[in-house]
Amino acid sequence: MKRKASTYTTSPSDLNEDTNALKKRTQRLYRGLKRLYPYAHCELNYTNPFELLVATILSAQCTDILVNRVTPNLFTKFPTPKDLAGAKQTDVEDLIRSTGFYRNKAKSLISASKDITEKFGGEVPNGMEELLTLRGVARKTANVVLGNAFDANHGIVVDTHVKRLCNRMGLSSETNPIRVERDLMALIPQEHWCVLSHLLIWHGRRVCSARKPNCTACTLRKDCRQNNLPS
């Protein structure tokens, strides 16, 4: 059953665009990103929803590259929610220590695995409300799992890259991730929500970096607010 599209609205950008103009510019940016990164995808390694959930929890304040180094050993030792639910805290900590905040992450992984085992029949739930009941799962993590493991566009993943690019491009002036997500959901068709986050993340990692964005080499600069602010 197709989910009802979002009714969120957004404000015009700093370029004094009306909503229709902003939507058209967003579509041009989306098409440009698709041309640049036709194979953009989640860069966390996983083979099932449970592995993606674990990897996403570990990715908080950590790079995907480092998470991908840690998860193979973790999944070998604890391949299912039931296995991880019965793990000793110290054993999990030892395996994920390099990802940072390892004590809290270990607690989250064990707690979430227990709930998946006891409340959801050993299967990662495929609904937003259910996922948000799991320890360590906020809206961003839930969006990652739903969009990538279940191909369900419930929302848009807003990480540091997405937030930074949306501010620079003039798609949102908000700094709160949930408000940035709200603005984006009003600008792009629902079927593109998951892909859009991948595209923005890939561009943020490869071109539009935090400290030194390569604006001169960016093929999207004509539609980017960063390059079109009044002097």
Image (cartoon, rainbow, N blue to C red):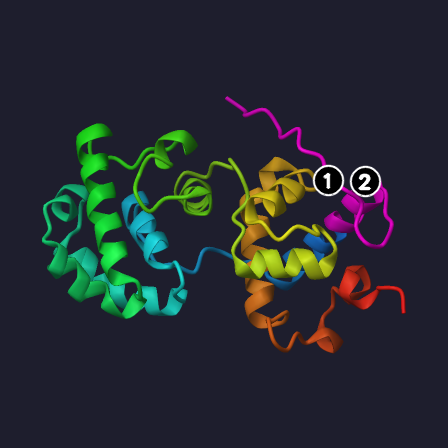
Residue at image location 56% in from the left, 61% down from the top: 161
- The secondary element bearing badge 2 is classed as helix
Highlighted magenta segment, given as a residue range: 1-27
Task: Check residue 205 for magenta coloring.
Answer: no
Which numbered marker is on residue 10? 1
Location of residue 193 with respect to 94 vertically, above or below: above
Residue at image location 23% in from the left, 62% down from the top: 72
Quadrant that contains the C terminus: bottom right
Amino acid carrying mark 2 in the image:
Thr
Q: Position of residue 129 (x, y in %)?
A: 40, 30
Front position among marks 2 and 1: 1
Tell me the crowding category of disc 2: few under 14, some 14 to 19, or many 20 or more residues within 10 angstroms, Cα based: some
Q: Position of residue 114 (x, y in %)?
A: 18, 39
Q: Nearer the viewer, residue 122 or 85?
A: 85
The residue furthest top is: 1
Amino acid carrying mark 1 in the image:
Thr
Q: Nearer the viewer, residue 221 or 61?
A: 61
Q: Nearer the viewer, residue 108 or 84?
A: 108
Residue at image location 80% in from the left, 46% down from the top: 22
Location of residue 216 with respect to 70 vertically, above or below: below
- The secondary element bearing badge 1 is classed as loop
> Cα distance, mark 2 to mark 1?
7 Å
Q: Position of residue 57 (x, y in %)?
A: 34, 53
Q: Which residue was labeled with disc 2?
A: 19
User: Is 195 on the left-hand or right-hand side of 49?
Assistant: right
Task: Check residue 4 for magenta coloring.
Answer: yes
Pointers 2 and 1 in contact (C-beta within 8 Å): yes
User: Is 130 on the left-hand or right-hand side of 184?
Assistant: left
Q: Within the image, what quadrant is residue 8 found in?
A: top right
